[in-house]
Image (cartoon, helix red, strand yellow):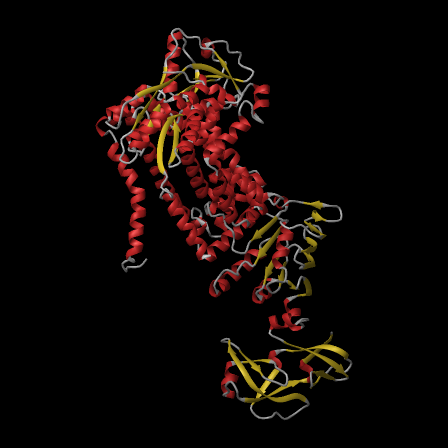
Amino acid sequence: MRRVVLVLMVALLTGACGGGARQELLVSAAASLTDAFTAVEAEYEAGHPDVDIVLNLGGSSALREQILSGAPVAVFASANQENIAEVVAAGLVAGPVVDFASNQLTIAVPAGNPGDIIGIGDLARDDLLIGLCAPVVPCGVYADEALAIAGVAAAPDTLEPDVRALLTKISAGELDAGIVYATDIATADGAVESVDIASEPAVAVTYSIAPIVGDENQADAADFIDFVLGPDGRRILGDLGFAAP
Amino acid sequence: MTRRRPPVLLGLLAAVGAVLFIAPLVGLLARTPWSDLGGVLGREIVADALGLSLLISLGATLLSLLFGLPLAWILARVEFRGRTLLRGLVLLPLVLPPVVGGAALLFTFGRRGLVGQPLEELTGLVLPFSVWGAILAAAFVAMPFLVITVEGALRNLDQRFEGAAAALGANRWTVLRRVTLPMIAPSLVSGLLLTWARALGEFGATITFAGNLPGRTQTLPLAVFVAMEGDRDAAVAMSLLLVFVSLAVLISLRRSWWRAR
Amino acid sequence: MRSGLDARVAVVHPGGFRLDVELTLEPGRTAAVLGPNGAGKSTLVAALSGLVPLSAGRVELGGCVLEDTASEISAPPEDRRIGIVHQDYLLFPTMSVLDNVAFGLRARGLSKSAAQRSAAALLARLDLSALADRRPADLSGGQAQRVALGRALATEPDMLLLDEPLAALDVTTRAQLRHMLADHLAGFAGPRLLITHDPAEAFLLADEIYVLEGGAITQTGSPEDIRMRPRTSYAADLAGANLLVGVADGGEVLVGSHRLTVADTSAQGPVLATIHPRAISIHIDPPSGSPRNSWSTIIKRIENYGDRVRVQTGGPLELTAEITPPALAALGMKIGDEIWLSIKATEVVVSAD
């Protein structure tokens, strides 16, 4: 019994110390980049066996707060430029900030469109259960922008902390509609349909990426960002519906 | 109580444990915008959240009393097959992660839910994303506290008193009202306080089932969560509010423990 | 009879214990059920009060059938008009003495004020008015006992049932309260049933005694009957008598290997022989005189009760003798001393087993 414990402990320790010298890279990415960056992680690790990407996904404002509080993040990919700007202002960015993708907003409805949504104007209807992202996250900021452009006073019934949580509730049929990113529609595997916002002008959703200050990982961070900005990254993003910035 | 000095290692570990509890409170107090506290507390997000928290927690406590008290009585007094299983299920929310509880509520009482769908078709009542949904979510996580406290008290009660009351001519309702409940009153009060405190602090089940909307379902814990990414001062002020309310509950609980002895 | 208790109570416990007794109580009389612990006393109380259903039998009180297994009638406890003074009194701890006494009246529909007035009057009759506002926790044992009695009497029940009413008290209080209890029992018009393990209580308070052992009544009779002619060794122990089992053969009874001479020459076969402790004489020298049972033995134990002394002797027949303190002093004996016993043949009471 004692031998088993000893062996386990050795395995744990060597594993924790990046056994085999695998370098860990913590990447914070906006929730809407979940599928895209998971694919990026797989391809990058295949080409760089000495690096272990750890993805930290969430609302961009939550990720910003983590970095400001000192989280050991190496790369920050945000769904808007404002969050990165705040990190820059705090002096925590270690290199250039680059816009690397763009997205579009759309209205998501459960499959079958039970609420008969035809446009953004329907989001003002009281008889429907409408969901939006909370105004502190980029998705919420963009949605408010779109609503303002269209001159619609929405009657939301919930303000979700990130876009994936919102999408989950729409795909479960608990909400009749919500404003999400166009790229999110495909991730719901058919449980969600999209209705065009058709806003003039269209809301510009711009994703930015930047390396974060930290001692060890600078070379790997820069490498990762180059991958995202390069042909492989663009292909992965493009396959999932993201457009060029 | 020993007057000898405690062993050094024990004292050291205990000190670390104490710091673990005290330090976060100190951190919170250090971050509080003392000079502007009144103004911050007066902000709409705070006022809305406070009012909702009180309404929802009190509603959840009442609901817990209405259904939890009879449930506790049945579990304590009536022997039936599956009683142990039922007790386990009733106590499940105590150990279940609240978000899981919220998800379960959504699958059951949501619009596409097992109960929720027929409920909406028959009565038009929609529970998620409403105040009632928030009350239900809070009651779901808090009611086990009432059940467990009251069941324990009923089990420890000397049932011969109820027999004596019956012999004097009291029917079962009178026995319950004039003998049983007064005799378990201290435990009932602590149970209610615990239930209320738990309902007040509920987050995971509420945000998953009832959603998050200022003025309708955004209770203090939810408001703190959202404000952390936006209005930090408000987040800290509301956290302070919650801490003080919790402390007040704990102090009152200690007092009712003493009385029960 | 119309207003008394007529009961046959049979209860079988899941564990196997069986209680089967018949009780007939007349109004105005006190009966005691006297038995050791485990005899079934609590089962009897629970069955009569309706907390435990009868396995078989019938209980009729004051002309009303409270329970009858044959016709499947069973009145719930709240409908049985039995006033119970419980072991440990069971005064409701969250209510004052006045509210405790008023409880039964309020439960039967009286308004709070009417019930409290009635209760206050009863407390006055029991000389307990000063305690009206106290909580049960602040009462002494004796006070609690009297309040419990008041609470039982307040509803004017058809019968009084007292379950070990003095057991929780110390010896002095018990003696004082025994007299008070006797007075109040005498003042109650219906039948009264006293359940106890204390023979002094039963002998002093009851008009008739039912001896309960192992779930069955082994003897009934007046206190004198039980004392003079106990039928079981438990009953004999209660009275302090010596009970021996033997075989009779024309004027002699063989108990073990010892022969006793008895006056009853007609007795034959298995018999119970009883010798009252006071019928045994103790001597230092071998006694002379008319035919007696006499033998030499030693003193095993001496118990001094103040006004009498009980001496336990060794073989060939271990007996308990009772003498006066002066007699003990005159004999000048101590434990281990050799003595001579003598018992008249007429003092050995023989009854068929």
Give the answer, above or below, for where B108 lies relative to C144.
above
Disc tally is: 0
- Indicate left or right for B201 with B133 as reference: left
**Residue C16, percent from left and from top:** 67, 59
Give the answer, above or below, for where A143 lies relative to B155.
above
Q: Which residue occupies the foreground of this view, C248 or B38?
A: B38
Q: Which residue occupies the foreground of this view, C24 or C117?
A: C24
**Residue C263, percent from left and from top:** 72, 83
Q: Quadrant of residue A157?
A: top left
Q: Which residue occupies the foreground of this view, A203 or A98?
A: A98
**Residue A129, percent from left and from top:** 48, 17
**Residue C186, percent from left and from top:** 58, 57
Q: Which residue occupies the foreground of this view, C290 or C36?
A: C36
- Indicate left or right for B36 with A137 as reference: left
- Indicate left or right for B256 with C193 as reference: left
Q: In the orientation shown, which residue stands out farthest toward the left?
A: B35
Residue B258 visible: no
Give the answer, above or below, for where C247 lies relative to C176.
below
Q: Quadrant of residue C110?
A: top right
- Indicate left or right for C275 with A44 as reference: right
Residue at (52% x, 87% y) in the render: C336
Quadrant containing the C terminus of chain A in the rendered view: top left
